[in-house]
Amino acid sequence: MCLAIPAKIVSIDGVIAKVDMMGNERIISIDLVPEVKIGEYVLVHAGFAIGVVDDQSAKETEELLLEVADAYAEGE
């Protein structure tokens, strides 16, 4: 199973971008989504942006991921 995390593009330098991924900064490749712009959200898997998503979808996914993390923490 694969998991892609939404991240907001903060800066772009060629095919490399800095993103904000749920409060954490990461450096990723945007080779697969060269049309992406600063301020847009992408889905990130294994260090690569694999698709551009709208703000609402990104925020809903973040909320669901946080719910899963909270449920997992409660079960420990």
Image (spheres, rainbow, N blue to C red):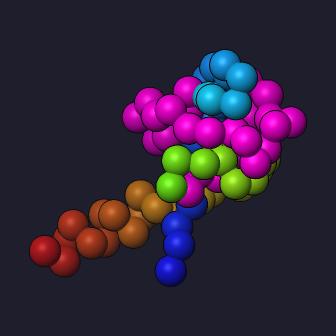
For this rendering, which residue is in front, 23 or 1? 1
Is residue 1 shown above or below 19? Answer: below
Direction from residue 57 to residue 37 in the image, left or right: right
Residue 6 seen from this side: no
Residue 1 seen from this side: yes
Q: Residue at x 27, y 72 (%)?
A: 72
Give coordinates of residue 10: x percent, y percent. Answer: 61, 23
For this rendering, which residue is in front, 21 or 2? 2
Check if residue 76 falls in the magenta segment: no
Direction from residue 48 to residue 26 in the image, left or right: left
Q: Residue at x 62, y 28 (%)?
A: 17
Is residue 21 shown above or below 9? Answer: below
Check if residue 39 falls in the magenta segment: yes
Q: Residue at x 52, y 47 (%)?
A: 47
The quadrant holding residue 70 is bottom left
Q: Residue at x 66, y 47 (%)?
A: 49
Is residue 73 shown above or below 16? Answer: below
Give coordinates of residue 34: x percent, y percent. Answer: 81, 37
The span picked out in magenta is: 18-45
